[in-house]
Each structure stands twice: as structure tokens, then as C-alpha cells.
Image (cartoon, helix red, strand yellow):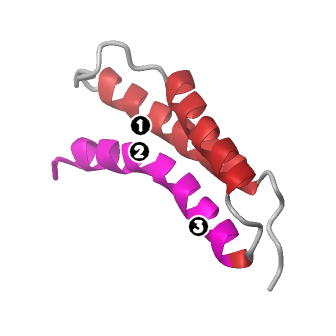
Amino acid sequence: MRQATPLAPFIISTLGAALDYATTRIGLINGLTETHPLYNPVYALVVFWSLLAVAKFFLPKEALWQRTILGMACFSFLGAFNNALLLVGLW
């Protein structure tokens, strides 16, 4: 199995936060409101990067744990998924 680059989780979480920001902006342009008054994608990115940095430091370097860290990085896409559901009217 091919090893992912050590920066892969950080790149994945950055893409997720950027997509969340983009879908939030689209929703705001279409008249929706943000429920969190202090929403800032930079804060979300700081939270995800902090979580990933701690996990990469403390978890073993075995393949299973590295895949777990990649899975945690994918949680950054949940905000974008939620926003997409709102935009198409399913939520």
C-alpha cells in the first residue's frame, strides 16, 4: 500500500474548510443566515489542524492509525455537506 504524504490530512482539512466557506458564502448570497454569529473558516481550520497535529504526534505510526487520522481530516467536509443540504432544500 502506498503511503500518503505527512501533509495529506492537513491538505484534506484545508479543502474541507474552504468548501465549507464557499458553500456558506453561496448561502449568504442567496438570503440564508449564518446561525453562528462568530463563524470564521480560519477558526475551523485552526481546530482541525490542532486536532490533526496532536493526533499525528501521539498516535502510533502504523498504517491503521494513519488512515484514522485521514478519516478525522475528512470530518472538515461535514460543514460543506450540511450547507449543501440547506442549499438544495433538503435540510
Q: Name the residue under label 1.
A: 23
Q: Tell me the kind of residue under disc 1.
A: Thr
- Give yes or no for contact between labels 1 and 3 (Cβ–Cβ under 8 Å): no
Residue 27 part of the magenta-drawn span: no
Residue at image location 65% in from the left, 69% down from the top: 65
Q: Position of residue 32 (x, y in %)?
A: 22, 25
How far apart marks 2 and 3 lie (CA) works out to: 21 Å
Q: Return the disc, 2 or 3, that comes first in the chain's sequence.
A: 3
Question: Residues in magenta?
Answer: 64-91
Q: Residues within 10 Å of mark 1 (few under 14, many from 20)?
A: many
Q: Position of residue 12 (x, y in %)?
A: 64, 51
Report the side of 77 relative to 38 (left or right). Answer: right
How far apart marks 2 and 1 lie (CA) works out to: 6 Å
Q: Tell me the kind of residue under disc 3.
A: Thr
Report the side of 80 relative to 61 (left or right). Answer: left
Q: Mark 2 points at which residue?
A: 80
Q: Residues within 10 Å of mark 2 (few under 14, many from 20)?
A: many
How far apart marks 1 and 3 lie (CA) works out to: 26 Å
- Give yes or no for contact between labels 2 and 1 (Cβ–Cβ under 8 Å): yes
Residue at image location 54% in from the left, 45% down from the top: 16
Q: Tell me the kind of residue under disc 2.
A: Ala
Q: Which mark is residue 63?
A: none
Q: Return the disc, 1 or 3, that comes first in the chain's sequence.
A: 1
Q: Position of residue 79 (x, y in %)?
A: 38, 43
Report the side of 27 relative to 16 (left or right). Answer: left
Q: Name the residue under label 3.
A: 68
84 vs 65: above or below: above
Q: What element carries label 3?
A: helix
Q: Can residue 77 be seen from the camera position used here?
A: yes
Q: Which of 23 and 40 is in front in this view?
A: 40
